[in-house]
Image: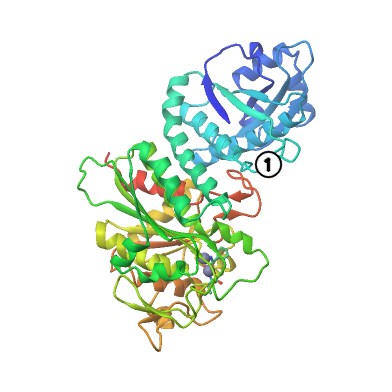
Amino acid sequence: MKIDFSATKLINECTEHLVAVGSFKDGGLSEGGKLLDKVLNGMISKSMQSLDFKGKIGDAIHIKSPENVAFYDVILFGVGEASNCQLDFEKVGAKLGISLSSAADKLFFSEVLAVVDLRGLAADEISLIANGLRLNSWNFDKYFTTEKTKPKRKLKGVKFLCDDPDAVCRFYKPLELVTNGVFLTREVVSEVPNVLYPETFAKIARKELEPLGATVEVLNEDDMASLGMNSLLAVGMGSEKESKLCVIRWLGADNPDAAPVAFVGKGVTFDTGGISIKPANNMHEMKYDMAGGGAVLGLMKALAGRKAKVNAVGVIGLVENMPSGSAQRPGDVVKSMSGQTIECLNTDAEGRMVLADALWYTQDRFSPKFMVNLATLTGAITVALGQEHAGLFSNNDKLSDELTESGKLSGDALWRMPMGDVYDKAINSTVADMKNIGDPGTGGSITAAQFLQRHVNGLPWAHLDIAGMAWADKSRSLCNKGASGFGVRLLDALVEKYYEDK
Ligand code: BES
Ligand code: ZN
Ligand code: ZN
């Protein structure tokens, strides 16, 4: 979706196919709306009256335009009570995008451009509306080979009319760069598992991050074996694809030696369950079991893209969990990089085995201020929180509060879950230091978090279980059905609000 900002005054001389004008609280029309209403002999105000249109957020009217004017149809949309909350403006933009898109699809043209008059709103408000519209416009259609099978999406560009385009662009640029990160996450999470596996994921990381000035290192199985990462390696043993560890560094703080913030992702590019194999129903969904790693990748793109004044590292444990003659067995015991031994009682509880070594490696090598890991770790978190909140588990109240606040600002909502010794006991094993599952059916998301906590060496840490949030079963305002990009906006907001040099 092409988005630009312009100060063109004469909305009635625009040559776009669709014209949208906003209506504010109490049904007042935007400046351009009033002008257009005159040109159209009161058509807009008459429609507003007859349909009792009050300009509530999300309300929209599609007005067919007479043929003797330069542009085609008019969309009147509600901006509502121009609230102070950033997220509300983004949601207005998303709803505007939905209205424009459905109007565009009804037009005769194969490609449709729209012009939206928002004069009267502040520069930051306009930029948020534009960003919300763009976030909503994303979709994954690379595998359709004909126009016939491809879902129709005619709207190709939106021009926003505003009083001061330069001021709007200044606000819009960082939002655009963070959204680029969200889109990268959505792309890799949507990518199919015969195309996306550890090696190709790492290639994408190099291609996307290096041009932005970030460094990308990729450790292979030999490198990880020398480091003693036997827990991560055990998960990938059954796969033909080589496991990798992707380490991305962005040094943006004034002091390049300042301790970094660290983000760690579960990158299981496909999770069959291994020898403890999953049922066939919906197994294909496990292509998104790398969404935690995908979020770390998108976040690093956002931070490097907008040149955030922070030192940040992103570590992604990349493996494919397959059953085969060389796969790990239930009952195997491995020694992780931390020196602790793990009895693997269920090869489908693999994410925690990957993260155990990725977390230990991260704290050992980088001594970060804190670590936040993201993982589609347990089905149980969706039972507990549905598709409304990701589970937040932490050993640190300050980090936990900062994350919760960032969740509210960004729309990537979090809900803190309990942890403690009583849950920790459940993963004690009879043959090793710990086992990789707790008691079946009891607090499965919490015992998984306890397992991770045993690998953070006491550092401030938070685990986000995003199993219910990474993939949206129904469309939401800022994202369509499918990969959500959850975590990128959240952690960018965390960095921006609490950890950047000012
Ligand atoms: N990748 C799954 C968790 C998952 C489930 C993510 C549904 C997204 C949607 C994870 O590796 C897994 O299989 N967890 C098991 C743990 C169990 C064996 C203790 C689960 O949740 O059933
Ligand atoms: Zn699994
Ligand atoms: Zn998994």
Label 1 belongs to which residue? 144
Figure check: 356 above or below 433: above
Query: Which residue is more in the foreground, 36 or 18?
Result: 18
Ligand 1's image quarter is bottom right
Quarter of the figure with residue 387: bottom right
Q: Position of residue 491 (x, y in %)?
A: 41, 49
Residue name at image x 45 percent, y 69 percent: 237
Q: Amino acid at mark 1?
A: Phe
15 to 152, vertically: above or below: above
Q: Residue furthest bottom?
A: 430
Residue 277 visible to an observer of this rendering = yes
- The N terminus: image quadrant: top right
Circle count: 1
Determine the residue positioned at 66% across, 14% down.
Answer: 15
The front one of 283 and 311 is 283
Residue situated in front as seen by the camera: 467 or 283 = 283
Image quadrant in which you'd find residue 3: top right
Examine the rendered structure and indicate whether residue 61 appears above or below residue 7.
Answer: below
Q: How is the image coloured?
A: rainbow
In this picture, residue 219 sits left or right of residue 441: left
The 10 Å Cα crowd at callout 1, few under 14, some 14 to 19, many 20 or more, is few
Q: Position of residue 41 (x, y in %)?
A: 76, 13
Expressed as whole percent of the image width and height from the top left, the position of residue 308 reads 33, 40
Q: Is residue 407 visible?
A: no
Q: Residue at x 60, y 71 (%)?
A: 278
Dot 1: what SS? loop
